[in-house]
Image (spheres, rainbow, N blue to C red):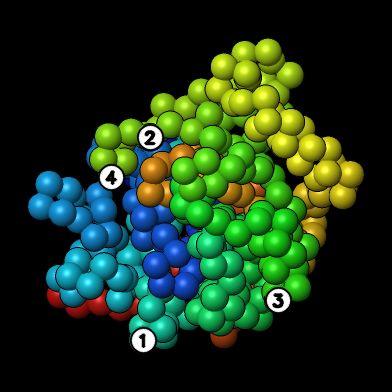
Amino acid sequence: MTLPETTSLTQQISARRTFAIISHPDAGKTTLTEKLLLYGNAIHLAGSVRARRSQRHTRSDWMAIERERGISVTSTVLQFPYKDRVINLLDTPGHEDFSEDTYRVLSATDSAVMVLDAAKGIEAQTRKLFEVCKQRGTPISTLINKMDRPSRDPLDLLEEIEKILGMQAVPMNWPIGDGESFRGIYDRLTRTVHIYRRVAHNATAADEVAVAVSDSALSDHLSEKEIAKLTADSELLDGLHYHIDDELFLGGTQTPVYFGSALTNFGVQLFLDAFVDRAPIPRPYISDNGLIEPERESFSGFVFKIQAN
C-alpha cells in the first residue's frame, strides 16, 4: 500500500505517518489499533481482543498466546492508506513482560499515541514508555479511552498529565458525560457536537451525527441540563486558553488530548482525522555514516526487528 510511483519523493515523505501506540495493559491499545484499521478501510469488520466464538480476533494479535490471554506480546507493523496519507502503525506489546520489544519499536517511530483509561489515568507502564519517548524527543498525542464507562473528571485527567508527565495537555475535544450518561463529544475546533451511538457488536464504523453547538436541533439529542453543562465547560476551556502550538507539540512539551471509546468506535475517526493532519513526517536519522535525510534517493531503512517463522 504505497502512493503511486508518479508521486514525487517529497510528496511521498510528506504523506507518511509512522507511529506507535503506548499504554498500560488493558487501556485499549490493541482495540484502538483494530478500530484505526476499520476507519482506514483496511478491514470491514473489527475484531475483539477477547473474542467470543461469534466474534473475530484482532489482526495485530495473531499469535495463539495473544488470543488466549487477550494481550499483545510481540510487535506488529500495519500499513494502510487514509485519505491522502500512508499510515504505518506499529502495534506494540503493552505488558511489561514484553517491554523490550516495545522499546525497540519506539526507536523507529516519528510520533506516538498515548492511550489512557479514563477511569485510571496514567499507570505504571504508560509512564515508563512515556519516558522512552521523552528521551528520544518523540511527539505524543493522547487519547483518553473508555468514555463509555464510568470515568474520572476530564479536568483531573488533564491535570494529572501535566503534573506527572510534565507536558501541557491541550483538550482538542471534550466529552459530554461518561458511562451510561455518555452522550457524545464536543469538537472545540469546529464547535460541533458528535452524538454518541453504538453499532451492533461494535464491529462496524459508528454512524455519527454532528450538530453545531449553536443549532437548536441540539436539544433533540441533549437535555437542557446537559446543554447547560456543555456551555459552561466550553467557556471554562476557552477561558483557560487551551490552544495547541505545533512547535511545542513537535518539541514534546505539549500534547493534544482527545476523548473517545475505541470499543464502541466512537470518537475514533475524529481522533484519526486530527492525528494525521498534525503528526510529523519522517525525520532524519543518525547512522554510522552520518545523518541520513528522508529525501535521500538511495535506499535506506531503520531495522528494529528481525523475525523468522
Viewer-closest of 42 and 29: 29
Q: CA distance from mark 2 to mark 1?
A: 34 Å
Kindly report the distance in space between the C-alpha atoms of the residues bearing marks 3 and 2: 34 Å
Q: Is residue 40 above or below residue 154?
A: above
Q: Secondary structure at mark 1?
A: helix
User: Vertically, is 195 above or below 35?
Assistant: above
Residue type, numbered disc 1: Asp
Sequence-wise, the earlier of marks 3 and 2 is 3
Kind of residue at disc 4: Ala
Assign the N terminus to one quadrant of the image: top left
Helix, strand or loop at mark 4: loop
Q: Is residue 43 visible?
A: no
Q: CA distance from mark 2 to mark 4?
A: 14 Å
User: Horizontal and vertical percent for residue 25?
Assistant: 41, 72
Q: Give the residue pinned by disc 1.
A: 97
Q: Which mark is residue 46?
A: 4
Q: How many marks?
A: 4
Is residue 288 rendered to the left or right of residue 51? Answer: right
Q: Amino acid at mark 2?
A: Arg
